Amino acid sequence: MKKLWDKFIPKIWTRLFLMIVVAILLTWIVIGASYYWLGNARLVVSNLSTVQAPNLAQTSRLSAQTTDIAMLSNRILSEGSTSSSNLEALLKTSVSELIAFINDGLDTTLTPYDAEILQRQLLLVIRHLSQTQKIEIRIRNKIEQLRWLNVDVQDEAAAVMADFAYNIEVLTRRLAQESNPSIRTEMAKILTHELHLQSIFSNIGNDTATGTTLAMQISTSQSSAQLDQFEDLIADALARINVNINILPSKPEYQFIRQASETLELMTTQPNGLVHERKAWHQTRQKFSGELDTVMFLLKDMQTKLLSQAETQRAEISLLGESFSENAAITLNLLLAMTIGAAAGGLAILFYYIRPSIIQPMENLTTAMRQIADGKPHMLNDLPVRDDEISHLEIAVNAFQNSVTERDQAIQDLHQTQNELVQVGKMAALGNLSAGISHELNQPLGAIRQRLRLAQKATKKNDTTNLNVQLTKIDDLVNRIERIILHLRRFARRSEYLSENVSLERVFTGAQELLSTQLLDHQIMVNMDPSLKGTTVVGDAILVEQVLVNLLSNSCDAIIATGGKGEILIRKEKSTADQLVFSIIDTGIGL
């Protein structure tokens, strides 16, 4: 079979196209069978939709209509913002729709007479609700008037209390300063009277505030017993206010307090006052609550009848549903068998052809490309002898691996050549410095020889002090030679390139030390820009020092060619934030 595929259909995409066509044909076969079998079930559904479902829907709509009326009745019981006219309009609409459903020819147990009785009862509830709302409006108006009356009384009492406080303070001071006993006695009586009046006004203000608070609680009382309790409390508060007012002197400035007390009593406990209005509200509320209970009873009876009718219709639909379920079960089993067969065929194609011929080779290609990208050599061996796209890709991957290997080898050779060139440059620089280095080494070696002779003489003379001095000098000269040799070894050794923080000042100093003999012999001064001190860059310290040695050596050669003294300046130049640019300027010949 595989050989036939490779011979007649060698291209993978052609094979996949044929497989997709076969899958589409199988899908259409399943859909056609489903359409045929579901057509038989459509007869049952048609009977449900044209006969049974409309009857059940109408019954459900009737039940929903009665539920809406019940919810509207509950709303009547708690509604406080919607006007009675709006509620009446909503009820009339709902009841008229209910009557229209009943008169529509539907077979139902409800009659138009049932709806008319319900409508008349609901209209009685609306009328009592309207009366309740009118009483609530009058109560709110009285409460608003009482609030403003309380504000005025508190303002008046505060002003009078302030006057009393001022008078008491003045009398207290005068009493403390008065030395005449008779006058002090008279002033003490006046002070006592002022304190008494101040206490009376304070009690009047407090009792007025208490009365206003009790009036607000009366306006929200939820039972007659609670209302009677609040009525007794406000009567006590009014009695205390009247007792205190009767004690006040008959002065014009106290007239407002007396009028406010009369107004408070008139608006609370007198006929048409707040207590009377709230009692009327409770009585009206009790009436329409009883009528509303009657409405709820009528609605419950209607819903019971509709529920019984709906149960009968559901039983009929259940019989049809069982028949439909049997046909649907047979259809589903057949469709399931066909679907499983199609799925099994698809899985067989997937696991026996697509996976070994396409997916696994593509995974091998992906793994090879990832390893090549990571720098790991990977060759595809045992390539199948085929003429399809996968084989072409495998050949291309192997060719790509070969080119990457050749490129890596070329880069490695280039790095090796570069390292050798760097080392050659170092050796060339050391060759240029050899004369100065030999002088640097010969000078301390000659000094050591001279110091050794002096040490021998000191030994013969047993002069330990001079001997120690000479040995110390010799040790310093040896350390100097050691530093020079270590510097040369560090400069000349072959190493890998490093990326580290390099101090420019330290590198400049090291380069000057290597060229110190040449600089001193020809009196060449090296100056560095102060802004470069303390500056660090990222790089290889040895390579940077080698570059500086070459540049400074070139500058020394240019100055020596002039035959006189010279100066070398290391100057910082303008650069970007992530770069550092400097130039080496000398007074020698050339550009």
Image: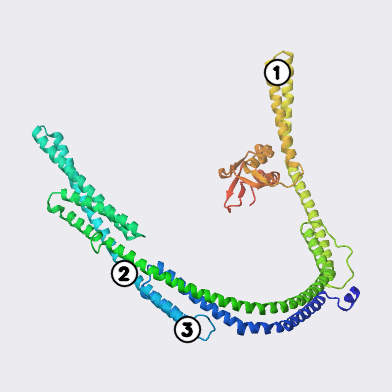
Mark 1 burial class by Cα count in 10 Å: few <14, some 14-19, many 20+: many
Mark 3 burial class by Cα count in 10 Å: few <14, some 14-19, many 20+: few
Amino acid beneath label 3: Ala
Query: On screen, 363 above or below 505?
Result: below
Q: Earlier in the sequence, mark 1 or mark 2?
A: 2
Q: Who's the residue at 21% across and 59% down the image?
A: 263
Q: Secondary structure at mark 2?
A: helix
Q: Position of residue 163 (x, y in %)?
A: 18, 47
Amino acid beneath label 2: Lys
* Residue ranking furthest to the bottom: 105
Q: Earlier in the sequence, mark 2 or mark 3?
A: 3
Pick whichever, 77 or 354, lies toward us.
Answer: 77
Q: CA distance from mark 1 to mark 2?
A: 129 Å
Q: CA distance from mark 3 to mark 1?
A: 138 Å
Describe residue 479's horizontal placement relative to residue 310 as left or right: right
Q: Position of residue 539 (x, y in %)?
A: 67, 47
Q: Which residue carries the number 3 mark? A: 100
Q: Which residue carries the number 2 mark? A: 134
Q: Position of residue 103 (x, y in %)?
A: 49, 85
Q: Which residue carries the number 1 mark? A: 467
Pick whichever, 199 or 517, lies toward us.
Answer: 199
Q: Who's the residue at 74% across and 14% down the image?
A: 460
Q: Secondary structure at mark 1?
A: helix
